[in-house]
Amino acid sequence: MILLQTPWTAKTAAQVLTPVLEQSIATLIAPEGALVLLPQANGGTADAVTEGELTSALCALSKAHAVSLCGSGYVRGETGAVQIIGYLADPDGTLKLRVPKILPELVNGFADSTANTSVPAEFPVEMTAEGQAGILCGEDILSPHIVRALVTSGAEVILNPSRERMDNLFDIRQKARQARSYENLTYVASASAASVTIGGATTKLPPATSLSEFWGTQVRTAADESFIHADVDIETLRRRRQEPMGNLPAIVRMRLYAQGYAEAASNAPPSPDTRDGWINEGRERVSASAQSERADKDRIDRYDAVLGQVITQVALKPDDLPEYKQRNLENALYVVGPFSKSPGVKLVVLPEFFLTGAVSQLGSRSGHIADKIGISFPGPEADQIAKFAQDNKTYVAGGVFEYDPKWPNRFFNSAFIFDDSGELIHLYRKIHCADAFGRLPDTTPGSVYTEYVDRYGYDHLFPVADTPLGKLCTVICFDMNFGETHRAMVKRGAEVIIHPTSEPHNVRRRGWDITRHVRAFENTAYLLTAGHGGEFRGEGLGFPGSMQRGYSKVVNYDGSLQCIVDGPGAVPLVGSLDLKALRRARADIKTNLAAWDDAVVYAHKYAEERGLGNNLWADDPMGNPYEDAAQIKKVIDIYQRDKVYIPPADAGFAPTIDQSMQAVV
């Protein structure tokens, strides 16, 4: 693939781009049908051309050089409205894709142009020599929902013609492209020009042309190079998509979100077509989603949080669980205890299943000992945590296996928050879990979706606690890979996302961790990750295992790192939260991405037969329909049937489920 940074217009395309294309194509061994991505065309809205002018220039250039050519630019419609539209022409010079921009021009401070914020998107794809491609213009790549909808429509390569500028969020926007590639098993190619000329003035732009691949690697320009060559190994991608482990587009429970999106889809206002209109619209959106001002005297806008990175002792026999849970609880509270007494510390966060470990050693069918594995609220362990919160005048959050007698022979992977008086104010049950691989025997709400929503209501899936410390929510470990859950919490007001985790150290750690920072950025929310520093897994073993290697961290609301435990061990980590600064950032209509999230764009795609379905474990709690990743394999088969996934050319390729525990997430 060839990615260009050369500025161009419809009128100058042939003259300016021909020598660059000739040089770039000449260096290819097999240039036939190569895919070329152009940046957004030069100029401002006053330089908009007709669609015919822009497409004629692109199609002529693609035919002249026998390449597939993608680019975008301002076009003026019959009504006079200006809009950015992306196009793809094939090597014969035939126009194959036409994709209007969905989000407004946030990076460039809005413009006298319209966008498709209020209509369902089509998400078309087209086969090229580099794979099945789709187009997302500019900031559209920053929306996890829009990207998910395009990938589950069949995109293997996402073409992102853009115009980037340098600001405090420039680097995290580039990381967002890496995150989209990782969490969707796709390539993301982005092209941004080295300069732009508007109204006769030319300004330099930062190097932002890149190709991101699904392990988290990104090849990027360093300066104002005219072009770069980027290697797209589409067969490797296709083989990877056949493997159930970490196959996030196949695992995502899209239909779990569909009900909420369908309800929200009718609320999108029509798109403005002027800069003033967008600014007024943005202010209304931000105002509507702003954190309500608490009048009580206990409101705290700045405080510290301590993350308890602990080492857990894992019981190998069911009968040992009660003793080990008590021992692990005492150890965890010992780690965070001294800091919890500090007047500035108002929140304590403990890891996922810090009382038991993952209990995968007890088998995938453990419903008969659900009451031994899980703790109850109230219950002896919960009562001790509540007392610790009360005694130390601090909120306490963490992740545990939870047993609720109302769900016999089942247990949930749950996150809790106790307030500083010892009251349970929040209980979230993990939506995306390693249960999907058949490795953990816990129940997720999607597995019993109909009964769960009938009992509690749809909003119970995404609880948010309104507290003097701001609006708090939790997500758990593997949830980090699915932006839909975080955004659902933020749409309900969440400002601080608490993330108890026990993620293992494996090949996906880089992509996962990039995504963690992007979650904070795309939601303008603090993200607090508390993980394990190791586990003791053997009788009398004198050292902990190294699969859990810590890296507990506090991520700021702009995606930047505040502090981190840079290795294993039992460590208390103290970070600081400033909610006034967060709310100031959320008031910025350019950077508050959640405010511009309109479900009408993608709701119809989430209602389709995509990802893991609901109610897959609604019957016998003593069985386990997920064993051997059976349900993920079925989704992969459906994706191949519907050409969402293209089978690899190697007909003999037979993916197998990785039996090593480090492949669980």
Image (spheres, grey):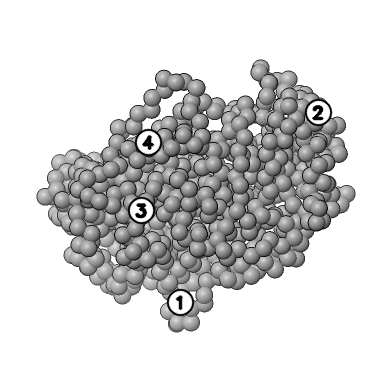
Spatial CA distance of label 2 from label 3 is 53 Å
The location of residue 111, given as percent across then percent down, is 75, 57
Q: Earlier in the sequence, mark 4 or mark 3?
A: 3
**Residue at image x 84%, y 53%?**
46
The residue that mark 1 highlights is 299
Q: Earlier in the sequence, mark 2 or mark 3?
A: 2
Spatial CA distance of label 1 from label 2 is 62 Å
Left or right of 54 on screen, residue 304: left
Q: Look at the numbered disc 3 and give the secondary structure of its residue.
A: helix
- The vertical placement of 504 against 230, above or below, is below
Q: Around disc 1, counting alpha carbons within 10 Å, would you say few (fewer than 14), some (14 to 19), or many (20 or more)?
A: few
Q: Earlier in the sequence, mark 1 or mark 3?
A: 1
Tell whether label 3 touches label 1 (CB within 8 Å): no
The location of residue 219, given as percent across then percent down, is 60, 34
The residue that mark 4 highlights is 633
Q: Which mark, by number, is residue 446? A: 3
Q: Earlier in the sequence, mark 2 or mark 4?
A: 2
Spatial CA distance of label 2 from label 4 is 46 Å
- The vertical placement of 93 against 599, above or below, is above
The residue that mark 2 highlights is 18
Quadrant for the N terminus in the image: top right
Q: Amino acid under label 4?
A: Lys
Q: Nearer the viewer, mark 4 or mark 1?
A: 4
Q: Which mark, by number, is residue 598? A: none
The location of residue 507, given as percent across then percent down, is 42, 35
Q: Can residue 582 be seen in this snapshot?
A: yes
Tell whether label 3 touches label 4 (CB within 8 Å): no
Q: Nearer the viewer, mark 2 or mark 4?
A: 4
